[in-house]
Amino acid sequence: MRLVGKKKIIISGAGLSGLTLGTALAQRGFDVQILERSPELREIGAGLYTWENGLKVLEEIGVYEEACANVEFITKLDMIDEKQELIHSTPFTQSNRFCIIPRKDVHSALARAAIKAGVQMETNACAVSADCSGTVTLDHGKTYSADLVVGADGIYSNIRNSLNIPHTFEKVNNGAVRALISRKEEDKKGIAEEHWSAYRRIGISPSTEQFMYVYLTASSADEEGLSDPWNKKAWLSSFPHLESILERIEHTRLDRYFYYVFLQSWSKGRVALLGDAAHGMEPNLGQGAGVSITSALELAKQLEKNDIDTALKDWEKLMRPTAEKTQLWSRIYGSAAAQWPKELLGIRSEVIRKTLGSENVDRMISTAARHVTGAGDVFSLTEVPDL
């Protein structure tokens, strides 16, 4: 039963951003309903890079202890070239944390928190469109109305596509194979690594006591590198020194392409777009989910203190710079890895070493990690020049 004066919010999509928003809103007294197209709440994927911004969100909505119960925090992230020489190292501290959480652990914790907060969950409910008045239509014709509809329905968002908001949807010719592998005693503790060799990369990160997270990225044109099933021989040819890691890969998830989404506006009337639906990005900085859940919490805070029109305007004003800078630097990082001129590969490590050694570049890349919801700005963001 809906209480008089209690704003009704309908969210399409029970992924990480949808559950975060639903939980945060319900905790603030909103009447929240989440529509999920799948027959059950579930999350696919391997590990979730979680930086300081994402960890703060998990803390604020009360799921940090559960989601991070088994994780091993990272003390440094090393970038290593084909000569096995260090290109760059990023240290982490208690005030600048980083870990890799199994995606299912985060999703399960968020789902339980949402239900506990009073969110109404409806599965087998595929939203195909929404109109500016706040009415959402399901694939079988049923409609729901709310004070606000939020499309958190992913990169191929039905809600976004029904609104006719001018936008860019780009398929990027880079992809990845991802996996969780069992750990061995000799594996490094607390140290994450990303190894580069020509146009391929392998990331290796401790996740929990039992698992390590591994990703293998390459150009989409690299048929051997992005084959299904994955081609161990092809990757061993590029990274023979990582045989101990590669031999443990069994179950993988392949994404042959990454995607980029840019919207002229994140909302239209009484409909807003969240997460990949609004600002899908390449995963090179490991901030796709982090930016999405940070944006979800920011939206909940703005809706709590403002009318809907003002909340949507202020939310986008606060979050768009973070999302766009992260999209940009993720694209630059991916281009350096997969599109560097072949004749200049010999100097790539030194160029990247000097670039990442720049304080301004470091601050731009870490824009998302430094975002604090409700602060009205990002740490000293105005001090960093735009590109």
Image (cartoon, rainbow, N blue to C red):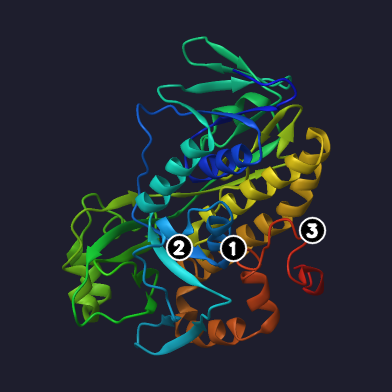
Q: CA distance from mark 1 to mark 3?
A: 15 Å
Locate residue 342, reporting x and y percent: 45, 74
Secondary structure under badge 2?
strand
- In the rendered structure, which amino acid carries the disc numbered 3? Gly
Query: Residue at coordinates 51% horizontally, 17% vertically from top-left?
Result: 138
Q: Which residue is mark 1?
A: 53
- In the rendered structure, which amino acid carries the disc numbered 2? Tyr
- Judge by depth and name the residue closer to the eye, 161 or 305: 305
The reply to whether discs 2 and 3 touch (Cβ–Cβ < 8 Å) is no
- In the rendered structure, which amino acid carries the disc numbered 1? Asn
- Judge by depth and name the residue closer to the eye, 193 or 26: 26
Residue 155 appears in the figure: no
Residue 36 appears in the figure: yes
Q: Which residue is mark 2?
A: 49
Classify 184 as above or below 210: below
Locate residue 212, reporting x and y percent: 29, 67
In the rendered structure, the answer to whether residue 149 lies left or right of residue 204 reads: right
Secondary structure under badge 1?
helix
Q: Quadrant of residue 131?
A: top right
How many marks do you count on the picture? Answer: 3
Mark 2 neighbour density, 10 Å: few (under 14) some (14–19) many (20 or more): many
Query: Residue at coordinates 24% horizontally, 66% vertically from top-left?
Result: 210
Query: Residue at coordinates 21% horizontally, 53% vertically from top-left?
Result: 251
Mark positioned earlier in the residue sequence (2 or 3): 2
Q: CA distance from mark 2 to mark 3?
A: 25 Å
Q: Which residue is mark 3?
A: 376
Comparing marks 2 and 1, which lies closer to the viewer? Answer: 1
Secondary structure under badge 3?
loop
Classify 179 as above or below 116: below
Mark positioned earlier in the residue sequence (1 or 3): 1
Q: Quadrant of residue 366?
A: bottom right
Q: Quadrant of the N terminus?
A: top right
